[in-house]
Image (cartoon, rainbow, N blue to C red):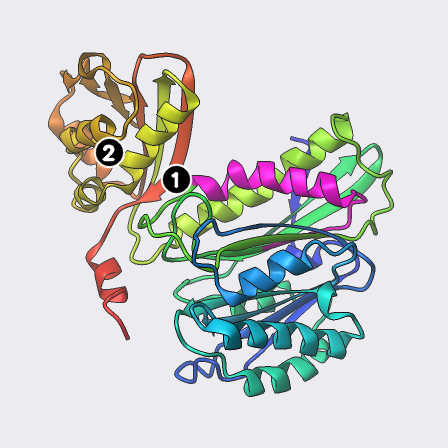
Amino acid sequence: MSYTEISGGVTASRGFLAGSAYCGIKASNPDRPDIALIYSTEPCAAAGTFTTNRVKAAPVRVSMMHVRSSDVRAIIANAGNANACTGIKGIENAKRMASTTADALGLKDRQVLVCSTGRIGVQLPIDKIKTTIAGLPAACSERGSLAAANAIMTSDTRTKEIAVEVDLDGTLVRIGGIAKGAGMIDPNMATMLCFITTDAAIDKKLLQRALSVSVEQSFNRITIDGDMSTNDTVLMLANGQAGNKPLRYGTPAFKDFQRSLDHITKHLARMIVEDGEGVTKFIEVHVHGGATYSDARRAAEAVANSNLVKCAWFGGDPNWGRLMDAVGYSGAKMREELVDIYYDGVLGVKGGMASKTPFTKLQEIVSGRRFSICIDLHMGSAEYSVFTTDLSVDYVKLNMGE
């Protein structure tokens, strides 16, 4: 392994500060901060990926414009209010968040990226937010990552952060990240925010390429409930303070950087799924033997998103018939009599029919906190994996409304 995990999250990277504050967006929880700031003391290249939902929240629209800037220094994010489906006023409020942050840091508006998460369709209490942002830089420090991670949580039960250090041609480079998730998690981004920093020297175009590849292998392969959010965003800032030679595509140093970044995003993606709303089980669904990559993906996502399958898992029932059903309607090329299904490596289905494995053995596996499902279509060599969960009674209760 070319990288080593270290502490510090987004502030492990040199030149980055972070902090949080409470401004009363969600008055029912005064003990939890609800606004976070991450910023670099030095110029940064920025990259981002955003929700593919056609209904995009105001901060997503603003950040999609600002991320194009040649020097992005800061990310301001609030929890408790998504600022989505809020019309022109919502756009104006997202811009006010950026401009107020820029004024507090001595930056230009376009050097600030904006994110929000929480309830849809409610206008931001912008006056409260502006007052809080004005004093927020004073709360930031080189040890503020955990505070920022705590401030962006909604229904999350725990903070999510990680950092690594990697040797790139003799120079130690750091990458750190924080994230939030919980519900409305579906491939092609989800109700999740993820902020990543690095002190590596890398140009904007290459940073975007590295992030896009990493997101495709991580956040685009998770699902909790099949609902795609209006606000999901992954942002990455690179300030070059490690002093390494600027990374070039295809070099050993860049490949080590990509592997390190992939570790960050996969780790945070897994943490999001494990902390999903009402989740009691974590499952990896792996399909191989697909005729094409698209077929393998369709089959894996159909199983991972099936409410019938997820309810069976919650009850500790292997119910492989529901898996076969999901693969069958997925649109993937398949032949029923060729399909094999394994539970943690134990054969449950052979040639589309029950194997000789005792049902109680499969039941024991599915009753565990973590297990894997491997589906072999025997139609080719393509494969695809998805992280998913069960669907519990608590999930329903959490989403009945406030």
**Quadrant hosting residue 138:** bottom right
Mark 2 lies on residue? 365
Mark 2 element type: helix
- The residue under label 1 is which amino acid type? Phe
- The residue under label 2 is which amino acid type? Ile
Whether label 2 touches label 1, CB < 8 Å: no
Mark 1 element type: strand
- The percent position of residue 70, horizontal first and vertical second, equals 78, 54
- The percent position of residue 330, horizontal first and vertical second, equals 27, 30
The segment highlighted magenta reads: 195-221
**Quadrant hosting residue 107:** bottom right
Mark 1 lies on residue? 387
Count of marks overlaid on the render? 2
Q: Is residue 143 visible?
A: no
- Vertical order, 107 against 243 (above or below): below
- The percent position of residue 229, horizontal first and vertical second, equals 41, 56
Q: Is residue 63 left or right of residue 13?
A: left
Q: Is residue 247 left or right of residue 332?
A: right
Q: Is residue 337 visible?
A: yes
- Vertical order, 123 against 303 (above or below): below
Q: Nearer the viewer, residue 204 or 91?
A: 91
Does residue 219 show up magenta in the picture? yes
For the C terminus, the quadrant is: bottom left
Query: Which residue is painted at 70% across and 59% down in the image?
Result: 11
Query: Which residue is painted at 32% across and 12% down in the image?
Result: 379
- The percent position of residue 233, horizontal first and vertical second, equals 54, 55
Q: Label 2, label 1: how many angstroms apart (C-alpha)?
A: 17 Å
Query: Which residue is painted at 20% across and 35% down in the image?
Result: 364
State which tag comes first along the sequence, 2 or 1.
Answer: 2
